[in-house]
Amino acid sequence: MKLLVTYNIPRTPFQELPADWEITFPEKEIMSKEEIIRLLPEYDVMLAIFHAPIDREILDAGKKLKLISNYGVGYNNIDIEYARKKGIAVTNTPKSVNNPTAELALSLMLSAARRVAECNLKIRTEKENMWGTMHNLGIGLENKTLGIIGMGNIGKNVALKAKAFGMQIIYYNDRTEVPGYRRVNLETLLKESDFISLHTPLTPQTRHLIGEHELSLMKPTTILINTARGAIIDEKALAKALTQRRITGAALDVFEDEPHITETLYGLNNVILTPHIGTGTIDARIAMGQEALDNIHHFLQGTPVNVVN
């Protein structure tokens, strides 16, 4: 079995593999599209990464390709329908990304609410002028309403953690009911929530799910958090709403056109920006590699798991 790993990830999970596996890692951080197309015809399995596109041209190059094991839970980087037509299975890593992403969502929520990132920057220039009993006032989480859009595994994890802070949880979801929390329609969630956290996958239906109209329904005190996919929010509409202070703030780990970010956002002090670090812990990176390898083992044994197409 020949495995092509397209991104430089921790090697720990790859230490003890079957003797008949042949693995190729990139010489640099990531393989270029040209490298992948040149090498892929000889490989049975490809380990792809969540932010690198796998389009029809790459899929056509996979003459022997049976499986794409995606390193990440999001798979909008892969043309999964075309892969299916070509008989190529696609898997993802939902378990290993769950807790670190939920942790970051809460970190961003707390930082935005208590103005941690803003104060950290300002105190370096304003120094003693920053201090004062009625200065730098933030918002507490206790008894506030958190609206979760997308109550899957990560959404439920965020809800559990937020409940420990004394928050009231409502959610909007097109799946089944989640016991213990109040399910509402999208308009109700937007109008009632003090904090809104996005945890839905990016699909044609969820692209720009949060646009100018949806932002206009939010309270002026709302804080919006996105650790899902950037294009779920109309980034330019959000930048406009933040500039005009129509909502209090936002905290974004993902963006429409990564690594490019709408220029206006860089100059605003009511938005926190992080470079897609939702799963950015060494523990998570190793666990993601292990889950991606486990997906390959299961597939080869005829007991596939985490197949998304």
Image: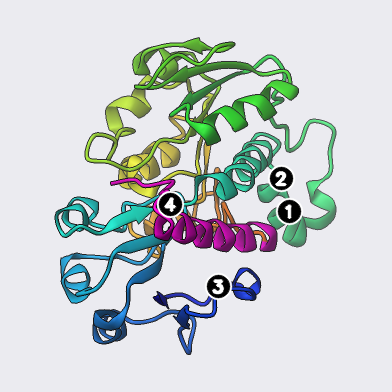
Specify which label sits upstream in the sequence, 4 or 1. Answer: 4
Query: In terms of image quadrants, where is residue 240?
Result: top left
Identify residue for label 3.
Answer: 9
Q: CA distance from mark 3 to mark 1?
A: 32 Å
Q: CA distance from mark 1 to mark 2?
A: 6 Å
On the picture, is 212 further left or further right than 289?
left
Q: Residues within 10 Å of mark 4 (few under 14, many from 20)?
A: many
Specify which label sits upstream in the sequence, 3 or 1. Answer: 3
> Disc 3 vs disc 1: Cβ atoms closer than 8 Å?
no
The percent position of residue 155, horizontal first and vertical second, equals 53, 31
Identify residue for label 2.
Answer: 116
Q: Which mark is residue 120?
A: 1
Q: Which mark is residue 92?
A: 4
Q: CA distance from mark 3 to mark 2?
A: 31 Å
The amino acid beneath tag 4 is: Asn
Q: Is residue 26 above or below residue 117?
A: below
Specify which label sits upstream in the sequence, 3 or 2. Answer: 3
Specify which label sits upstream in the sequence, 4 or 2. Answer: 4
Specify which label sits upstream in the sequence, 4 or 3. Answer: 3
245 or 231, which is in the foreground?
A: 231
> Disc 1 vs disc 2: Cβ atoms closer than 8 Å?
yes
